[in-house]
Image (cartoon, rainbow, N blue to C red):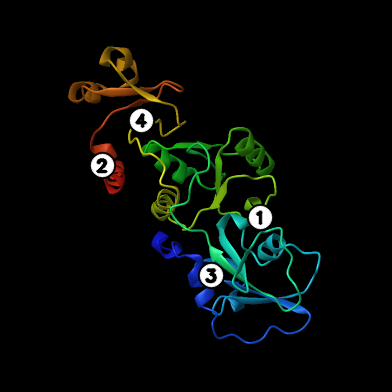
């Protein structure tokens, strides 16, 4: 889904339901914004309407997540034209409009991200643009939630169950299957500061210029003959230089400059 399709406001969620059938007694109805309907069950995607049994003890947040929409993706919540919180409770036959979170979204903290185990390529693309993107190949969900909280990072994932963890303060669902689409989604949503070519793609450490003499033992003879400018990661020691091998990466960088 294109990132620009997500940037609608809460008013669009309300306007879509101007002509709707009455909510039956003993039920409440959720009207889901079009940009969030891919998250709900297939038969509700066209109308965006989901009827649920009325449970006086259920919070609005619980109801929204029960139909498959993480609160990380939700903007305004409106009942009869009144803004309500995720902790509110609905009355019998209430209709809840669920808006999509507006973009760009404030980071509400440092521009640091933590990616789950399925987003390794996206992590490298973010690092290419100079975005702090931590990634652990074998981290389990509990570790990711704990680390995101401890290091004040935005947890990025396509796992809705993970994003519904109560202890997460900053998190987001990554839209798209292709890494290029995923990168556009994250950059368009959060607009983090970009410093291309400043971070190691392998580990995320800072890159610093280094003399040829200091890295000669890590390079092939052909590279030594044709290249004069090198950078080395302060954390893992990986050496970088520009050349024909990184033309694809240069295209990615130009797209966001």
Residue 75 vertical position relative to residue 198 in the rendered view, above or below? below
Name above or below for residue 14 compared with residue 171: below
Residue sitting at 63 percent across and 74 percent down? 80
Residue that extends furthest to the front in the rendered view of this protein: 82
- State whether residue 130 is above or below residue 119: above
Q: CA distance from mark 3 to mark 1?
A: 20 Å
Q: Residue furthest top?
A: 213
Give whichever of 109, 143 is nearer the camera.
Answer: 109
Callout 3–callout 1 Cβ contact below 8 Å: no
Location of mark 3 (residue) = 33
Of pointers 3 and 2, the one earlier in the residue sequence: 3
Measure the alpha-carbon separation of dots 2 and 4: 17 Å
Front label number (1 vs 2) = 1
Q: Residue 242's spot in the image, x, y percent?
A: 25, 32
Q: Earlier in the sequence, mark 3 or mark 1?
A: 3
Query: What numbered label is drawn on residue 161?
Result: 1
């Amino acid at each position: 889904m294109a990132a620009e399709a997500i940037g609608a406001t809460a008013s669009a969620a309300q306007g879509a339901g101007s002509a709707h059938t009455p909510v039956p007694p003993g039920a409440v109805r959720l009207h889901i914004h079009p940009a969030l309907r891919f998250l709900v069950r297939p038969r509700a995607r066209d109308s965006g309407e989901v009827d649920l049994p009325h449970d006086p003890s259920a919070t609005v947040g619980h109801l929204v997540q029960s139909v498959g929409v993480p609160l990380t993706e939700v903007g305004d919540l409106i009942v009869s034209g009144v803004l309500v919180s995720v902790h509110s409770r609905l009355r019998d036959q209430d209709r809840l409009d669920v808006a999509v979170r507006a973009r760009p979204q404030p980071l509400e903290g440092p521009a640091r991200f933590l990616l789950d185990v399925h987003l390794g390529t996206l992590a490298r693309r973010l690092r290419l643009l100079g975005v702090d993107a931590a990634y652990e190949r074998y981290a389990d969900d509990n570790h990711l939630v704990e680390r995101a909280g401890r290091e004040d990072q935005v947890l990025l994932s396509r796992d809705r169950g993970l994003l519904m963890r109560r202890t997460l303060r900053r998190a987001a669902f990554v839209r798209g299957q292709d890494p290029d689409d995923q990168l556009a989604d994250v950059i368009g949503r959060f607009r983090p500061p970009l410093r291309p070519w400043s971070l190691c793609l392998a580990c995320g450490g800072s890159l610093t210029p280094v003399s040829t003499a200091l890295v000669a033992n890590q390079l092939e003879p052909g590279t030594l003959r044709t290249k004069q400018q090198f950078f080395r990661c302060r954390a893992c020691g990986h050496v970088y230089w520009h050349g024909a091998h990184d033309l694809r990466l240069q295209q990615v960088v130009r797209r966001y400059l």
